[in-house]
């Protein structure tokens, strides 16, 4: 007859589910979300000092680490050429062919559908903000907002969004915002490779969130919670200094396959970034508890 030899020591430390996969080309200042994927995983490799004397015990100075690296792997389901170009660090040539300019007219973001400092998608098919002309942004019936002061247009993963800021002009979220734009969407997109030797490093962020009912420990970590509230325990893993270490491998499934999606495997090797402080050169794990509202704001930011 079996029996339990222990009990759960800290319920809050149990994590479930996959993660969001984000890539940055500017040392973590901005990220592109790579969308749905399978098989997201990471592994750390440690190379120990292994020299030993022939005639005595090993000096303690040789009981150390020679290097640490990490490998991040996964399978892309969203085969987006701009994201693949970003991931591969400039070893490819990415090009687009523009189509006819479009009068986008008024895009109305109704009250309740936006918050300060949270990107709101404009649902415009663009690859760069260079193809976008923002004619006006108006709050309520007639309050004209200023670019760079009251709002900012941002691009992330091929999506154009507007971020609205609380200012002396824009004082409340309880109003609609009207964005009038013209844009030139892309037509053909190409991603070609071969012949380049330089490669740029990339920063990867993986975000896992586990929903739970808040415990006293959760409340201690986030004073906005009450015991029993729905909350999200987030686990954020940053890898600082990596590059792709395998080429594309594309398999097209059978038309009768029960798993018909075309997947592109990715693998990246991360090394220690000597420009960072010792002890924080390979990766960082951040644990944070969010209220549900704060989690939605955070999740919508990527």
Image: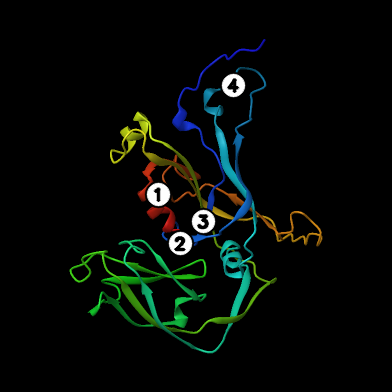
Q: Please provide percent x and percent y for residue 111.
A: 31, 66
> From the viewer's perspective, is 68 left or right of 156?
right
Q: Which residue is mark 2?
A: 26
Q: Which residue is mark 1?
A: 295
Q: Quadrant of residue 257?
A: bottom right
4 or 1: tag closer to the N-terminus? 4
**As rendered, which of 109 and 102 lies closer to the eye?**
109
Q: Are marks 4 and 2 in contact (CB under 8 Å)?
A: no
Q: Marks 3 and 2, how far apart in space?
A: 12 Å
Name the residue located 61 percent from the left edge and 65 percent from the top edge.
Answer: 84
Q: Which residue is mark 3?
A: 22
Query: So how many labels did they put on this image?
Result: 4
1 or 2: tag closer to the N-terminus? 2
Q: Please provide percent x and percent y for residue 28.
A: 44, 56
3 or 1: tag closer to the N-terminus? 3
Q: Marks 1 and 2, how far apart in space?
A: 24 Å
**As rendered, which of 279 and 29 lies closer to the eye?**
29
Instruction: Identify the secondary structure beneath mark 4.
Output: loop
Q: Which residue is mark 4?
A: 58
Which of the two discs, 3 and 1, sits closer to the camera?
A: 1
**As rendered, which of 295 and 273 lies closer to the eye?**
295
Q: Give neighbour class at mark 4: few <14, some 14-19, many 20+ (Cα, 10 Å).
A: few
**Figure check: 280 above or below 246:** above
**Figure check: 179 above or below 223:** below
Which of the two discs, 4 and 2, sits closer to the camera?
A: 2
Q: Marks 3 and 1, how far apart in space?
A: 17 Å
Name the residue located 51 percent from the left edge and 56 percent from the top edge.
Answer: 22
Q: Please provide percent x and percent y for residue 66.
A: 57, 37
Q: Give neighbour class at mark 3: few <14, some 14-19, many 20+ (Cα, 10 Å).
A: many
């Amino acid at each position: 007859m079996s029996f339990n030899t222990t009990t759960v020591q800290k319920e809050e430390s149990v994590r479930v589910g996959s993660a969001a996969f984000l890539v940055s080309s500017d040392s973590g200042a901005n990220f592109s979300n790579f969308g749905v994927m399978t098989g997201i995983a990471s592994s750390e490799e440690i190379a120990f000092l292994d020299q030993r004397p022939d005639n005595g015990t090993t000096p303690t100075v040789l009981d150390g680490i020679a290097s640490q690296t990490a490998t991040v792997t996964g399978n892309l389901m969203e085969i987006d050429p701009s994201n693949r170009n970003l991931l591969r660090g400039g070893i490819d040539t990415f090009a687009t062919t523009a189509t006819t300019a479009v009068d986008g007219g008024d895009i109305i973001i109704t009250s309740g559908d936006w918050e300060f400092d949270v990107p709101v998608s404009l649902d415009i098919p663009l690859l760069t903000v260079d193809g976008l002309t923002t004619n006006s942004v108006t709050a309520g019936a007639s309050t004209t907002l200023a670019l760079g002061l009251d709002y900012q247009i941002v691009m992330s993963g091929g999506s154009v969004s507007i971020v609205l800021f609380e200012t002396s002009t824009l004082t409340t979220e309880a109003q609609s915002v009207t964005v009038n734009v013209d844009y030139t969407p892309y037509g053909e997109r190409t991603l070609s490779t071969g012949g380049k030797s330089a490669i740029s490093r990339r920063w990867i962020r993986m975000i896992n969130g586990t929903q739970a009912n808040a415990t006293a420990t959760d409340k201690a970590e986030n004073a906005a919670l009450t015991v029993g509230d729905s909350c999200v325990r987030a686990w954020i893993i940053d890898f600082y200094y990596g590059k792709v270490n395998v080429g594309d491998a594309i398999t097209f499934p059978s038309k009768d396959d029960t798993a018909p999606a075309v997947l592109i495997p990715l693998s990246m090797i991360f090394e220690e970034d000597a420009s960072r402080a010792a002890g924080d050169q390979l990766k960082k794990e951040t644990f944070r508890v969010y209220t549900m509202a704060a989690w939605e704001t955070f999740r919508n930011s990527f």
